[in-house]
Image (spheres, coloured by chain):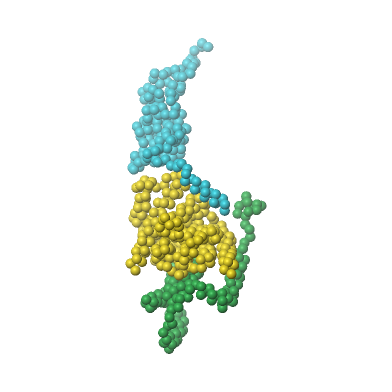
Chain colours: A cyan, B green, C yellow
């Protein structure tokens, strides 16, 4: 019985506390950097697409909202021909980001994606691709991978030894 | 002022009571009974018994009828029971009791017409007078009623008593 | 006679506006006590939310379920409004502002509040819905039980003032408010009043976490609005009654008119009701009944007996 009176008094004291509400449209809530919001495709430091079209994100997606088609350009770099995310199905779980081997797909702290038309929630590659390196600045996949593309032969990558010539007899 | 008000209230009481008897749906019958009780309360108020009128509404309309409705609600009577009621209420069944009632009514009308003296002046009985009467000359009846209620309470407590139940296995062996 | 109609009109106008305004007041106060803002967009301080709510209620589909008992279904919401509004008839707002100065004012209030049970019971039964029925049954037993010791608690006041007339009860408090000699009675009446208006924390007839919306699950539009407004009117009624019976009604220092004193005190109690809602958990149904019959009922009888004994002792 007394505990009820005590709780009433404590609640009454809340009258003089600071209000916790964010007056949303005018005043936005500060989001943590790892907030899982809108999905974006990031770029290399030199401006190339990071995505190599490995389909791992599409495979990891529990609601199957990602679809893409990989292709290869004449320099040997793989890239997605189209990359489509249906945000009306996306649950923002972040599995795609975890699955991505090249840090290409990233979830950003942005949630203002409401649309009147459901079809507008299907984002194509031009909507997803941003001119930024996202959370991993300076990371360049092709600079680390041993794969040869035009302008970067085998052995040119970061901390990579030159390839061993197996046909040579010299030790 | 009192005349028309009395006749309206009395007519409502009689009509509502007739409706109570003729309804097939028991809930509607109970509602008409409530209306009838309210009309009787109005009559009581008009003839100088405001305390009695208030008690009529509080106890009969407000408590006892709610209890009846409460039990009817638990019985889950639907359309079928109304149909059944309809079957039961055939003229063959109600004609004899209503004949008896008509005889009684005739007797009542006869007596009312015989004893044709003007109604006495309305004398208002205030709650104090009711209290004095109850705890003065009628103290024995009050005590008896109290005894009866006490017995009822003890009986209800005995019927409603149940063994201590542990609500959760974690609370077993603990004094609550 | 014209004065009489003016009083009726004024009281009705004030009450309905209070009930509507309470929608806003309650939401703002709850928000304040929960560190939120509450409605603050429409109009100054969000006051127009009352208007928006009313418009919304009016334009909702006024649906009667096909499985419902139509007559009773329509009739039930009117009962709550009617019984509560009728109770205000005997409420003395000020020495002159009282619609009917009945000799049995207090009993009239009890009678009307006991008729108020019907709205819950009939509304729940007519909906023909199991949740509504459960809510109605809880409501019926809760309100009947709490009515008993509500009446018994009030009898302490009657013993002290020697009258059922509410105006005389207020005048009997000229020297000392009845809250002092009748503190236990006041507490019992407060608890019973909360239960009688089935407000939180005693809102088990409409406990939304268990029973969808309890007895008014099937109601929409203005019929729901009637229940809604009836609830706020009930709060106002119980607050007004608390003020009349225990806090000296319109009595107060002379620098404010009596009506204003009454309004201020009533408003304080409405705030208390909202604070109840903000701070208390809902008891389980059996806890409520147990608390009522095993604690409040003996306490109220004891209160009555002690009050009567002291009064007799002082008189002889």
Outermost residue, top side? A170
- The residue shown at (43%, 81%) is B121
Reply above or below: C218 against C105. Answer: above
Outermost residue, right side? B173
Reply above or below: C133 against A38. Answer: below
Marker count (numbered)? 0
Outermost residue, bottom side? B114
Quarter of the view holding residue C265: bottom left
Residue C154 percent location from the top left of the image:
51, 64
- The residue shown at (40%, 75%) is B9
- The residue shown at (43%, 69%) is C102
Outermost residue, front side? C254
Residue B117 percent location from the top left of the image:
42, 86
Quarter of the view holding residue B5: bottom left
Q: Is residue A8 visible?
A: yes
Is residue B153 left or right of C124 when viewed as pictured? right
Q: Which of B119 and C41 is in front in this view?
A: B119
Q: Which of C254 and A147 is in front in this view?
A: C254
Q: Can residue B102 be seen in this view?
A: no
Residue C308 percent location from the top left of the image:
57, 67
- The quarter of the picture where the N terminus of chain C appears is bottom left
- The residue shown at (45%, 34%) is A32
- The quarter of the picture where the C terminus of chain C appears is bottom right
Residue A151 percent location from the top left of the image:
39, 18
Quarter of the view holding residue C58: bottom left
């Amino acid at each position: 019985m007394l505990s009820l009176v005590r709780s009433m008094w404590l609640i009454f004291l809340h009258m003089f506390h600071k209000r916790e509400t964010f007056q949303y449209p005018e005043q936005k809530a500060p989001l943590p950097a790892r907030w899982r919001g809108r999905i974006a495709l990031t770029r290399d430091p030199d401006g190339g697409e990071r995505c190599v079209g490995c389909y791992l994100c599409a495979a990891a997606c529990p609601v199957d909202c990602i679809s893409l088609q990989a292709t290869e350009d004449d320099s040997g770099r793989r890239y997605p021909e189209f990359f489509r995310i249906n945000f009306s199905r996306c649950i923002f779980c972040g599995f795609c980001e975890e699955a991505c081997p090249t840090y290409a797909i990233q979830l950003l702290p942005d949630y203002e994606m409401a649309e009147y038309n459901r079809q507008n929630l299907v984002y194509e590659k031009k909507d997803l691709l941003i001119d930024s390196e996202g959370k991993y600045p300076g990371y360049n996949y092709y600079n680390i991978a041993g794969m040869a593309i035009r302008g970067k032969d085998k052995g040119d990558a970061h901390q990579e030894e030159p390839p061993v010539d197996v046909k040579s007899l010299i030790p | 002022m009192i005349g028309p008000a009395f006749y309206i209230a009395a007519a409502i009481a009689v009509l509502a009571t007739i409706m109570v008897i003729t309804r097939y749906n028991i809930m509607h019958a109970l509602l008409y009974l409530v209306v009838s009780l309210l009309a009787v309360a109005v009559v009581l108020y008009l003839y100088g018994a405001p305390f009695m009128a208030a008690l009529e509404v509080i106890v009969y309309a407000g408590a006892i009828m709610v209890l009846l409705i409460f039990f009817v609600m638990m019985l889950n009577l639907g359309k079928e029971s109304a149909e059944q009621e309809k079957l039961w209420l055939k003229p063959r069944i109600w004609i004899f009791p209503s004949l008896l009632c008509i005889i009684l009514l005739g007797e009542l009308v006869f007596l009312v017409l015989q004893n044709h003296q003007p109604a006495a002046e309305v004398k208002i009985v205030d709650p104090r007078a009711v209290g004095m009467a109850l705890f003065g000359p009628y103290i024995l009846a009050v005590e008896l009623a109290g005894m009866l209620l006490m017995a009822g309470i003890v009986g209800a407590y005995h019927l409603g008593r149940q063994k201590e139940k542990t609500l959760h296995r974690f609370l077993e062996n603990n004094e609550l | 006679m014209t004065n009489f109609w003016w009083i009726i009109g004024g009281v009705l106008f004030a009450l309905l506006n209070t009930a509507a305004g309470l929608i806003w007041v309650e939401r703002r106060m709850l928000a304040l006590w929960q560190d939120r803002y509450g409605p603050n967009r429409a109009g100054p301080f969000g006051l127009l939310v009352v208007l928006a709510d009313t418009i919304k209620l009016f334009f909702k589909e006024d649906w009667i379920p096909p499985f419902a008992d139509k007559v009773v279904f329509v009739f039930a919401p009117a009962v709550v409004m009617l019984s509560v509004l009728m109770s205000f008839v005997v409420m003395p707002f000020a020495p002159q502002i009282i619609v009917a100065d009945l000799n049995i004012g207090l009993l009239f209030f009890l009678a009307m509040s006991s008729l108020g049970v019907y709205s819950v019971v009939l509304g729940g039964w007519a909906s023909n819905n199991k949740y509504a029925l459960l809510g109605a049954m809880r409501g019926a037993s809760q309100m009947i039980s709490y009515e008993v010791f509500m009446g018994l608690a009030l009898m302490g006041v009657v013993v002290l003032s020697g009258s059922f007339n509410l105006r005389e009860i207020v005048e009997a408090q000229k020297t000392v408010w009845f809250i002092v000699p009748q503190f236990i009675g006041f507490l019992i009446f407060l608890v019973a009043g909360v239960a009688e208006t089935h407000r939180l924390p005693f809102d088990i007839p409409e406990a939304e976490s268990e029973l969808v919306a309890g007895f008014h699950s099937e109601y929409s539009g203005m019929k729901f609005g009637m229940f809604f407004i009836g609830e706020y009117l009930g709060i106002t009624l119980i607050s007004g009654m608390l003020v009349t019976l225990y806090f000296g009604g319109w009595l107060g220092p002379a620098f404010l008119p009596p009506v204003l004193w009454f309004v201020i005190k009533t408003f304080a109690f409405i705030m208390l009701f909202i604070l109840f809602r903000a701070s208390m958990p809902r008891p389980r149904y059996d806890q409520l009944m147990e608390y009522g019959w095993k604690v409040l009922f003996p306490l109220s009888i004891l209160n009555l007996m002690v009050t009567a004994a002291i009064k007799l002792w002082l008189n002889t």
